[in-house]
């Protein structure tokens, strides 16, 4: 299954190696930004939530510009400087000492990350064909989470809120990790050039984001993504961590092990899920993701009800939530980018991927800002109800998307090909 998931072109394989190396650094810091800002640097919960939300706001504001630059100049010229800016900003987190410095550093990080996601997806799409993209995007996500899990397990054994130097160390290591994909991209001079240059005569393509927004199926996909990520991914850094530590009352080490369980689930299940998804409805898979995410939050809510009454059961509930969430991710990771690029044209591929990444920017604003107050209400029960209901609503939106897609776009080309046509009449 691994050989089948690997892309045919060696350049794409090297890009995947860069994903793995940078993800290890990301895993060192992913679950601890909220805890670092509050318990180590002394920011209030509300102020830390605003800082993280500001990151999402800046990323959101700059993502459209990133997509335009990718289409006009090529992903290579955009991704390389963004990786360097991201490295500088992440390393500077080790020096944060106040709210003002936190806002400044997070702004730098947001500038760097605003075009990395869309640029790397555009590069992978340009190095693969329609038949292998879903598998390659799934493998890319598995490697991303493998790296995050390795980093999370490592930082879980290192960080100590009583020793700020341990947090400074992991942020410096994270900064170094962002240089790895940049170095790999430098060794591939032919990768990431402008896709539409030959066809468009080196002129900017017409339509731009207006053309993207007129694409009704893609608009529906964006609505689905906004609801799902606001109630799903956007809750990991703040909602999940804060609920686990404040309501369930587990230690940060348990949170790290929960993320490790998430990684184990993804690494073990991703290749199997990729194979099972072939020839099946993509919208059906997206609807299933919403249901799985809702189940994960319900398990976490149950752990909150147990609380300190049974510390072991509560900790297992936190870990189980993260593992179940990971299974949902194995379905979302190959389908969402593959469907985005199935709807995109070469001339506007950067903008389509930028719009897709903007989903995370918008949810990155809403999720952190609302998680703190919701968790503080009724011992977190309001937060649990909100995220569970949002994930189920996303499933409904995904099912409504199916009628707007052609069978090939929905991944059902195999099913469509076996439908018998009219029998020709002999002369």
Image (cartoon, grey):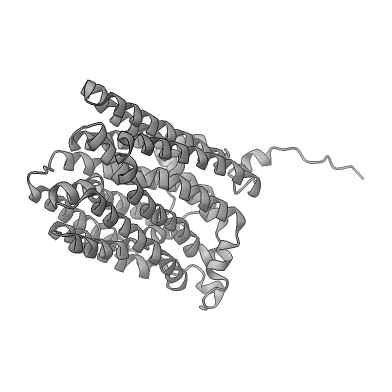
Residue 237: percent from left, percent from top? 29, 46
Vertical comparison of 149 with 211: above or below: above
Q: Which of 73 and 365 is in front in this view?
A: 365
Q: In this view, does 101 lie above or below 16?
A: below
- Residue 154 visible in the picture: yes
Q: Quadrant of the C terminus?
A: top right
Residue at the far right in the pictured view: 427
Hey, which residue is sitting farthest front in the picture? 378
Question: Relative to 219, is 239 on the left or the right?
Answer: left
Considering depth in this image, is 422 or 46 the residue closer to the camera? 46
Q: What percent of the width, then of the height, locates residue 120? A: 39, 58
Viewport quadrant of the N terminus? top left
Give the answer, above or below, for where 254 lies relative to 233: above
Nearer to us in this view, 397 or 341: 397
Q: Which quadrant of the structure image shows residue 310?
A: top left
Image coords of residue 362 (percent x, y): 41, 56
- Residue at (32%, 39%) from the top-left corner? 377
Identify which residue is drawn at 15% across, 46% down: 39
Residue drawn at (50%, 35%) of the image: 288
Residue 6 in view (yes/no) = no
Q: In this view, does 94 lie to the left or right of 141?
A: left
Picture residue at 17% right of the left edge, 43% below the top: 155
The quadrant where residue 279 appears: top right
Horizontal arrangement in the rendering, residue 422 relative to residue 110 (left or right): right
**How many numbered badges does the structure rendering display?**
0
């Amino acid at each position: 299954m691994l050989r089948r998931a690997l892309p045919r072109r060696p350049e794409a394989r090297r890009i995947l190696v860069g994903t793995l190396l940078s993800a290890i650094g990301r895993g060192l810091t992913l679950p601890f930004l909220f805890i670092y800002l509050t318990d180590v640097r002394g920011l209030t919960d509300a102020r830390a939530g605003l800082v993280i939300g500001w990151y999402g706001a800046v990323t959101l504001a700059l993502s459209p510009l990133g997509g335009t630059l990718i289409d006009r100049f090529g992903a290579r010229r955009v991704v390389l400087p963004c990786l360097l800016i991201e490295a500088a900003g992440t390393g500077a987190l080790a020096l944060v000492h106040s709210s003002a410095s936190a806002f400044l550093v997070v702004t730098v990080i947001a500038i760097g990350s605003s075009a990395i996601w869309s640029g790397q997806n555009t590069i992978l799409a340009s190095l693969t064909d329609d038949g292998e993209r879903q598998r390659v995007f799934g493998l890319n996500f598995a490697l991303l989470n493998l790296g995050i899990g390795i980093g999370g397990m490592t930082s879980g054994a290192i960080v100590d809120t009583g020793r700020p130097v341990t947090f400074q160390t992991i942020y410096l290591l994270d900064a170094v990790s962002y240089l790895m994909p940049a170095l790999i991209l430098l060794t591939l001079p032919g990768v990431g050039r402008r896709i539409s240059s030959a066809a468009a005569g080196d002129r900017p393509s017409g339509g731009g984001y207006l053309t993207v927004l007129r694409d009704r199926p893609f608009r529906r996909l964006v609505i689905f993504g906004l609801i799902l990520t606001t109630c799903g991914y956007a809750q990991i850094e703040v909602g999940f961590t804060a609920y686990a530590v404040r309501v369930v009352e587990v230690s940060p080490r348990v949170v790290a092990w929960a993320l490790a369980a998430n990684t184990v689930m993804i690494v073990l299940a991703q290749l199997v899920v990729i194979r099972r998804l072939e020839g099946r409805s993509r919208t059906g898979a997206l609807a299933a993701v919403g249901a799985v995410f809702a189940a994960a939050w319900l398990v976490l809510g149950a752990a909150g009800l147990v609380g300190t009454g049974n510390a072991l059961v509560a900790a297992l509930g936190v870990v189980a939530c993260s593992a179940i969430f990971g299974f949902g991710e194995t379905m979302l990771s190959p389908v969402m980018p593959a469907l985005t690029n199935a709807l995109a044209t070469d001339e506007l591929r950067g903008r389509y991927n930028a719009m897709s990444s903007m989903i995370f920017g918008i949810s990155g604003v809403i999720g952190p800002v609302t998680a703190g107050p919701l968790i503080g209400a009724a011992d977190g029960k309001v937060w649990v109800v909100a995220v569970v209901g949002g994930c189920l609503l996303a499933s409904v939106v995904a099912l409504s998307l199916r009628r707007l897609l052609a069978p090939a776009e929905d991944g059902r080309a195999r099913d469509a090909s076996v439908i018998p046509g009219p029998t020709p009449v002999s002369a």
